[in-house]
Image (cartoon, helix red, strand yellow):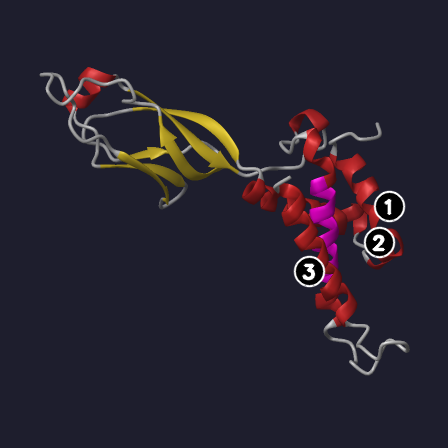
Amino acid sequence: MAGSMSRADLVADLKAGLQDAANVFTAAADGDFIRHLDASALDMGRVRPRTLLGEVTLVADQAAYAAPAGMLMFKSALWGMKRPLPWEKTWPGRLPTGRAVEGATARELHLAPPPDATQISVLGASYKFYYYAGHAISDTAASTTVQPGDRALLLLRAQAEAMKELAMRNSAKPVALRDGISGSPRNGTPSYLFEALMQQFDQQAVL
């Protein structure tokens, strides 16, 4: 379907937008274009942060907990937002600060200082929090996390990614190849387009 957020439709429109430059990318099963879109989806988090809700069950004096799948950064805690005031007997004291940390085998949520038994008794053991996660392109439109309203922005970023790869590819070619009109190296064209497209991407992202 035209305008769909599925991987296949995004690849098709990326190819169309690249025009003849698309012929340079010849990986099987559209692997090059999928790579461009995947890299662009990750960068979309810079301009369109993806916030999700997480929850862990607290254990007294325990600092480390399994992080939700795909968690990039801790954002803010909901636990303890409604708590007794300092002059009340049940005031829980200083609350933990959350942070995403690379554990020995998987990403972890660390709370410092660890919640104590009194805090858990007053505020509950269910620690809810917001966290940042990366965007992803999926085979189905419903599972692609970039919003349909940002479709053009995603494709623009993917075009820039393609130009970056072209610039790297051309960097190994003889610089004697030059534009007959301006005298400037043809090898610089993809690099220029990458910079121009990234500038356009950043400008459109704040509109």
Q: Position of residue 167 (x, y in %)?
A: 73, 66
SS category of the residue bearing label 3: helix
Amino acid residing under circle 3: Glu
Label 2 secondary element: helix
- Which of the two marks, 3 or 2, is nearer to us in this view? 3
Q: Where 174 sits versus 78, above or below?
A: below
**Mark 1 or mark 2, earlier in chain:** 1
Q: Which residue is mark 3?
A: 195
Q: CA distance from mark 3 to mark 1?
A: 20 Å
The first of marks 3 and 1 along the sequence is: 1
Callout 1 touching callout 2 (CB < 8 Å) = yes
- Which residue shows up at 72% across the image and 32% down it? 139
**Image coords of residue 109 (percent x, y):** 35, 36
The amino acid on which the numbered mark 2 sits, given as a three-letter code, is Ala
Where are the magenta residues, as a range?
Answer: 153-166
List x then y, in percent, for residue 153.
Answer: 70, 41
